[in-house]
Image (cartoon, rainbow, N blue to C red):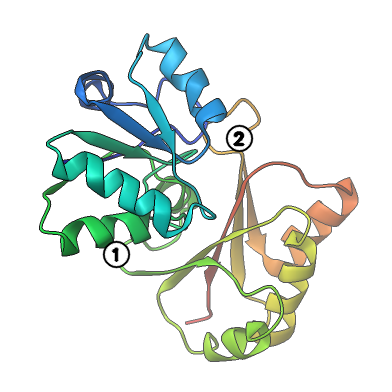
């Protein structure tokens, strides 16, 4: 069986009892970054062997993990943070495993997009998740298409591009409400809320923005 195990997005205490048990019981852990994941495993005294599985692994690594599963081994898939398959390469492996007729079992836990949503103060009943936005091609078209979107819009953004992206939101969507959720569950966790111009002003005043960032948008009614 392939277990899809969610891991903390910041605070290492945000892992479930079940997740720790599964990570100890499986034969192998497929980790996005074995060095990064090693910190979590060491904290919880998990000694299960790791194999790497990341965005550049390719078909060879998928086949290798499939071979483990077909030989009766249990494998746990983890990402660097959060729920595997959400804006990371986990989808490729999960699809291949299911196509091979092998059972998949999710182990729920931390997710940056859900943490940002419930802490944002924006409507949570319906939302649109966009992952990471296109870097260049298609970005303007995307923003234009979001003009009439009534659901809460959520996406991840690099801190280096954040200010530029907020300017684009202002240009294409107008004076909408935004929330910038930064460093979720970590020591410097922060929510910057308000109209896009106000949030822009606060962030431009401080200069450099650091940490993992989730952006939420609420269009005018």
Q: How far across and how far down the image is residue 83, in percent?
A: 37, 45
Residue 171 visible, this angle: yes
Q: Residues within 10 Å of mark 2 (few under 14, many from 20)?
A: few
Vertical relation: 188 (above or below) 105: above
Which one is in front in this view, the residue at disc 1 or the one at disc 2? 2
- Of residues 132 and 28, the one drawn nearer to the viewer in this rendering: 28
- Of residues 129 and 94, the one drawn nearer to the viewer in this rendering: 94
Q: Residue at x 28, y 24 (%)?
A: 23
Outermost top residue: 45
Give the residue pinned by disc 2. 189
Reading the chain from its start, which is encountered first: label 1 or label 2? 1
Q: Number of labelled discs?
A: 2
Vertical relation: 175 (above or below) 67: below
In what element is the residue under mark 1?
loop
Mark 1 to mark 2 CA distance (whole Å): 24 Å
Q: How far across and how far down the image is residue 101, in percent?
A: 10, 58
Give the residue pinned by disc 1. 125
Q: Residues within 10 Å of mark 1 (few under 14, many from 20)?
A: few
Q: Quadrant of residue 143?
A: bottom right
Residue 2 visible, this angle: no
Q: Viewed as shown, does residue 27 lie left or right of 185? A: left
Q: Viewed as shown, does residue 174 lie left or right of 17? A: right
Vertical relation: 5 (above or below) 97: above
């Amino acid at each position: 069986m392939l277990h899809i195990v969610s891991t903390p997005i910041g605070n290492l205490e945000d892992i479930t009892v079940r997740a720790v048990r599964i990570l100890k019981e499986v034969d192998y852990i497929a980790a996005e970054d074995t060095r990064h994941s090693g910190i979590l495993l060491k904290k919880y005294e998990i000694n299960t062997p790791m194999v790497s599985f990341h965005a550049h692994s390719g078909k060879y690594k998928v086949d290798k993990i499939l071979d483990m599963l077909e030989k009766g081994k249990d494998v746990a898939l983890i990402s660097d943070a959060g729920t595997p398959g959400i804006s990371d390469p986990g989808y490729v492996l999960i699809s291949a495993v299911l196509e091979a007729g092998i059972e998949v079992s999710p182990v729920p836990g931390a997710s940056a997009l859900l943490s940002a949503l419930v802490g944002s103060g924006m409507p949570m009943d319906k939302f649109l998740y966009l992952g990471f936005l296109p870097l260049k091609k298609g970005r303007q078209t995307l923003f234009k298409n979001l003009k009439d979107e009534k659901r809460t819009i959520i996406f991840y953004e690099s801190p280096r591009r954040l200010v530029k992206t907020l300017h684009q939101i202002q240009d294409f969507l107008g004076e909408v409400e935004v929330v910038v959720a930064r460093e979720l569950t970590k020591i410097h966790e922060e929510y910057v809320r308000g109209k896009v111009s106000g949030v822009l002003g606060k962030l431009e005043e401080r200069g450099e923005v650091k940490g993992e960032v989730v952006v939420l948008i609420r269009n005018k009614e």
